[in-house]
Image: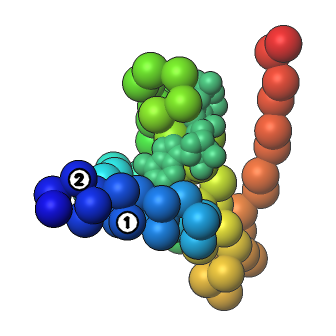
Amino acid sequence: MVQKILRERFCHHYATGKLFGIEHQYRHLLELLKRTAVHGESNSALIIGPRGSGKTALLNHVLKELTEMKQVRETLLEVHLNGK
Ligand SMILES: Nc1ncnc2c1ncn2[C@@H]1O[C@H](COP(=O)(O)OP(=O)(O)OP(=O)(O)O)[C@@H](O)[C@H]1O
Ligand SMILES: [Mg+2]
């Protein structure tokens, strides 16, 4: 029974592209970057975790929500660097 519930929850979230289990980190990063963009706070964030734990997905979700906010969109400059 528990297995069934967990499987459904995981599969549902993966299928819909929603994040699962990292809501706290999502809120935290969103608020931090929002304050950086809107109030000019000098912040930095290091996202660490095992491979496939959702670091990139977390950042992409946060950036997507931020760019949908008018007050943030006006001041935000997104720069992607790839060190590979
Ligand atoms: N908490 C989560 N909720 C929903 N999907 C997740 C979660 N964690 C990982 N995924 C999914 O798993 C896959 C791998 O995640 P992602 O690429 O973000 O991991 P990563 O931490 O950036 O890995 P890497 O260290 O290899 O860069 C993606 O398809 C992502 O959407
Ligand atoms: Mg990644």
x and y percent of residue 12 in the render? 47, 69
Q: Quadrant of ligand 1?
A: top right
82 shown above or below 69: above
Q: Residue 3 carries which label?
A: 2
**2 or 1: tag closer to the N-terminus:** 2
Q: Residue furthest front?
A: 1
x and y percent of residue 26 in the render? 39, 57
* Residue displayed at 35% across by 65% down: 9
Quarter of the image where the N terminus is located: bottom left
* Secondary structure type for disc 2: helix
- Residue denoted by label 1: 8
x and y percent of residue 75 in the render? 70, 68
* Residue displayed at 53% across by 22% down: 51
Q: The disc labelled 2 sits on which kind of residue?
A: Gln
Query: What is the spatial separation of the Cα atoms under label 2 and label 1, in whole angstroms?
Result: 9 Å
Q: In this view, does 45 lie to the left or right of 52?
A: left
* Secondary structure type for disc 1: helix
Callout 1 crowding tier (Cα within 10 Å): few <14, some 14–19, many ≥20? few
Q: In this view, does 3 lie to the left or right of 51?
A: left
Callout 2 crowding tier (Cα within 10 Å): few <14, some 14–19, many ≥20? few
* Residue displayed at 48% across by 60% down: 11
The answer to whether any part of residue 44 appears in the image is no
